[in-house]
Image (spheres, rainbow, N blue to C red):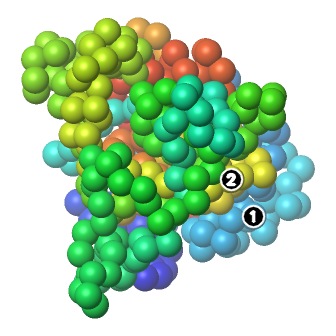
Amino acid sequence: MRYSLSLLICLLFVLSGCTSKSALSPSDESFVTSLKQHNERFEAVSQNENFDELLFLFKQNCTAPQTKKVYANVCEQSLHVKDAKAFFLNSFELKKIEPNEQRSMLTGYYEPLLHGSLKKTDRFKYPVYAKPKDLLMIVGENDKKMRGRSVKGKMVPYYTREEISKRKLNAEVLCYVDDKIDLFFMEVQGSGRVELSDGRVLFIGYSDANGHAYKSLGREMMNRGIFASVEEISLQSIRAWLVAHPNQIDTLLNTNPSYVFFRKMEQKATGSLGLVLTPERSVAVDRSYIPLGSLLAVKSESANYKVEKFVFAQDTGGAIKGPNRADMFMGYGERAQWIAGELKAPLEVWIMQPKF
């Protein structure tokens, strides 16, 4: 379903009302207050900003069709800019996205490295599946997409994670990897790299999913008393516990019925917008609140990571729900993995709304 920009903005800020811009003039007190707040927030985010880099990334962001629906005029104007900071200051206004009952939080994700083979061996025995040939998708009420398979002419749910582990799918196997935990984490991240035994590297990206709702492994482990609090949960702590308790790996992984299928990519990690993700510039959001392609300002701080900068909404994720929820792409390598695995911090979000 397509929405006009004005309707999207109204939907985003319906809790606080949606007032026509024509109702305000430069002499109005509300206009002056709004302008002051915009300038103060813009300058705060701008302290360590490289605006030439931001403009370059904005132009790249504008190559996606969905971005042009949100920023049609400013995308065109960005091609003729001489002063990058003035362009962002004068062409947009910051609108605070207020939280709802869901938790406001910034987390991180990264591009993992797995080890694999094109042939199944005793070591490399866990398949990385492409989208199955019998996986179907239909569009239901309110444009809700539902996935399943056809059995005697009737649509039934597709196989769960546990069912997939016990059968041979009607799907191409892109490669085999040597660690089922790493494969699970690659599903959560949505993409990764697989280094083959001959030294070649396959870029693997998200293709589709089985249609079952994502369930958090960390929360399940906390519910079972493995972890005492959310603060104890991280990618590193989950992996360490699973490695120490190999007889419980399958049972715990199967509590998440969602399963991701992949495709070979010619490039590095790519988001839902179809663009290559930029470390610490690309975030995954809930598209029901924030249109993909949006330029955002975010502010967040934890013990190990602090950020206040402009970022781009270029991806989505099954666990990213709510208006003040974002997952920042950290890139590739040990630092990216460490930060992404540990990051859980309060989050404030502003959307950069075009002035015209």
Q: Residue at x 38, y 18 (%)?
A: 239
Where, by quadrant of the figure, is residue 121 drawn? top right
Residue on which disc 1 sits:
63
Q: Residue at x 72, y 32 (%)?
A: 196
Q: Is residue 46 above or below residue 24?
A: above
Residue on which disc 2 sits:
264
Image location (x, y in percent) of residue 67:
63, 65
Q: Would residue 263 be visible to someone looking at this image?
A: yes
Q: Nearer the viewer, residue 23 or 4?
A: 4
Disc with the residue nearer the chain's start (2 vs 1): 1
Q: Residue at x 78, y 69 (%)?
A: 76
Q: Is residue 159 above or below residue 322?
A: below
Looking at the rendered structure, the number of numbered marks drawn on it comes to 2
Q: Secondary structure at mark 2?
A: strand
Residue type at the position of mark 1: Thr
Image location (x, y in percent) of residue 15:
23, 60
Q: CA distance from mark 2 to mark 1?
A: 22 Å
Where, by quadrant of the figure, is residue 309 drawn? top right
The quadrant of the rendering that contains the C terminus is bottom right
Image location (x, y in percent) of residue 203:
70, 43
